[in-house]
Each structure stands twice: as C-alpha cells, then as structure tokens.
C-alpha cells in the first residue's frame, strides 16, 4: 500500500536530523561561538547547491555510465565534495569570522548538512518514506555528510592557520578535498556493490568515521588561539 504518512510530520522527520547535528557541532566550539547568522547562511548555501549538483551528476551518468567505481568516487562523492569545497574556499576561507581552527569544521559541517537535509527531504518526498526509513537515513547518510564535513573543515583550518604559507598550505587544502572524497566514495561504493548484508559494512564504517571525526574536533579545539587565553584565566583565578 502507498504510504499515507501526513506530509508535515514526514518533512519534520526529514529535516530534524540535519538541524540537530548542526546544533551539536555548533555547541562543540569550546572557546568562541560563531555568529548564528553566518552558520545559518552557510547551511542555506548547502540547500542551494543541491540542484546544480544533481544536474551535473545526471549529465556525468549519461556521459560516463554507471560503473560502480566511477559512480562512487567521481560522480557522487567527487562532484558533491568538490562543490562543497569550492563554496567553502571562496566564501568562507578568507572571511573575517574564520578566525580559529574549529571554525573550518563548523562551516564545512554546516554546508554539508544543508546539502544532506535537502537531499533527505527529496528522498522522503519522492519515495514516500516511512519514519523508520528516515531514522536509518539520519544515522547513515545524514551523519555521514556531517563526518565528511568534519574532515574537510579540519584540513581547511590547518591550511588557513599553518605558519608555512607555501607547500604545506597547498597540501592541507588538497587533503581537505581528497580525504572526505575518499571516505565518501568508500561509503557509496559499499551501497552500490554490496546488495545483501550491506549494513554489516556500513555500520562499522560509520563508527570509525565518528571516532576519527570527533578526534579531529578535539584537535581543532585544542589548536584554538583562545585555548591558551582560557588556560591562563583558569590558572589566574
């Protein structure tokens, strides 16, 4: 039978995971919260890039075909991560509000979750998804996009605040694109090639990505210039 789930609860269930994860990472900034309007603006940019990405991906599928390796690393992960990276680099990287390492993570997560939220809404609308389906998507692709954003933002922060403005900066900028692209491609490749028991591969991957990503969050916070100021204040109290 066709789903008769009311549209408003369905949309709420599709949107809520992205908002919840964005709030979570916003509150993870230990020393200096970013202006909310900036975070929301970047989140909404994630909304806007969905349709251009879909157009490019559809064109590439017609051109390159649907080989799983190409589809995973070039058409899906490649296009999505490249567009997100382009937006961050040209709109956030040199912005005055990007003034500590963790900011890179927050803004990259914001644009990634904006993209994932609209993707989730479209999925729910087209497929008449049940709440159980949307819960699974919240635990897997939506949080996956958040983790890819953490990786991108972490290395973009390292590029911005490294003392060497030459080779190391360029290397970290390359990492900020290639590392999330690699893990995103691995995730998509599993879904495209493992038809049975895929959950046994995806869940350990997600656990690893969260462990890896939260380690990057801690390191980025520890590199904040406000970390030493806060430490001195605690010592002098």
Image: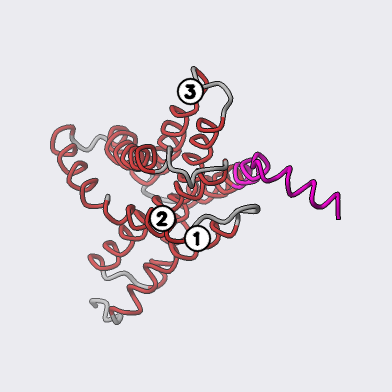
Q: Nearer the viewer, residue 105 or 160?
A: 160
Q: Are marks 3 and 2 in contact (CB under 8 Å)?
A: no
Name the chief secondary structure element in magenta: helix
Please name which of the two marks, 3 or 1, marks the residue nearer to the observer: 3
Q: Is residue 193 visible?
A: no
Q: How is the image coloured?
A: secondary structure
Cα distance in 3D space between marks 3 and 2:
25 Å
* Residue indicated by mark 3: 171
Cα distance in 3D space between marks 3 and 1:
29 Å
Q: Is residue 234 visible?
A: yes
Q: Is residue 235 left or right of residue 110?
A: right
| Percent coordinates x, y for residue 48 in the rendering | 26, 54
Q: Nearer the viewer, residue 95 or 72?
A: 95
For mark 2, does the 10 Å Cα neighbourhood hold few (<14), some (14 to 19), or many (20 or more) residues?
A: many
Q: Is residue 150 magenta?
A: no
Q: Are marks 2 and 1 in contact (CB under 8 Å)?
A: yes
Q: Quadrant of the C terminus?
A: bottom right
* Residue indicated by mark 2: 113
* Residue indicated by mark 1: 21
Cα distance in 3D space between marks 2 and 1:
8 Å
Circle number at residue 7: none
| Chain part drawn in magenta | 214-237
Judged from the image, the secondary structure of the residue bearing numbered disc 2 is helix
**Residue at 25% across, 34% down:** 67
Q: Is residue 231 magenta?
A: yes
Instruction: Identify the residue at the far top of this view.
Output: 167
Judged from the image, the secondary structure of the residue bearing numbered disc 3 is helix
Q: Earlier in the sequence, mark 3 or mark 2?
A: 2
**Residue at 24% across, 78% down:** 1
For mark 1, does the 10 Å Cα neighbourhood hold few (<14), some (14 to 19), or many (20 or more) residues?
A: some
């Amino acid at each position: 039978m066709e789903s008769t789930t009311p549209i408003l609860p369905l949309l709420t269930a599709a949107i809520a995971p992205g908002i919840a994860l964005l709030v979570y990472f916003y509150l993870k900034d230990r020393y200096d919260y970013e202006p909310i309007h900036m975070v929301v603006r970047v989140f909404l940019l994630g909304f806007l890039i969905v349709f251009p990405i879909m157009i490019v991906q559809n064109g590439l599928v017609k051109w390159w075909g649907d080989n799983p390796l190409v589809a995973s690393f070039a058409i899906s992960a490649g296009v999505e991560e490249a567009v997100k990276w382009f937006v961050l680099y040209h709109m956030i990287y040199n912005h005055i509000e990007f003034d500590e390492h963790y900011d890179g993570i927050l803004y990259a997560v914001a644009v990634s979750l904006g993209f994932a939220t609209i993707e989730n809404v479209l999925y729910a609308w087209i497929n008449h998804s049940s709440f159980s389906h949307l819960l699974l998507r919240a635990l897997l692709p939506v949080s996956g996009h958040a983790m890819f954003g953490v990786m991108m933002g972490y290395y973009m922060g390292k590029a911005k605040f490294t003392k060497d403005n030459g080779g190391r900066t360029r290397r970290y900028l390359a990492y900020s694109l290639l590392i999330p692209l690699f893990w995103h491609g691995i995730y998509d490749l599993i879904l495209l090639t493992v038809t049975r028991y895929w959950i046994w591969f995806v869940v350990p991957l997600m656990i690893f990505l969260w462990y890896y990503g939260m380690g990057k969050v801690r390191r980025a916070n520890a590199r904040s210039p406000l970390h030493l100021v806060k430490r001195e204040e605690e010592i002098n109290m």
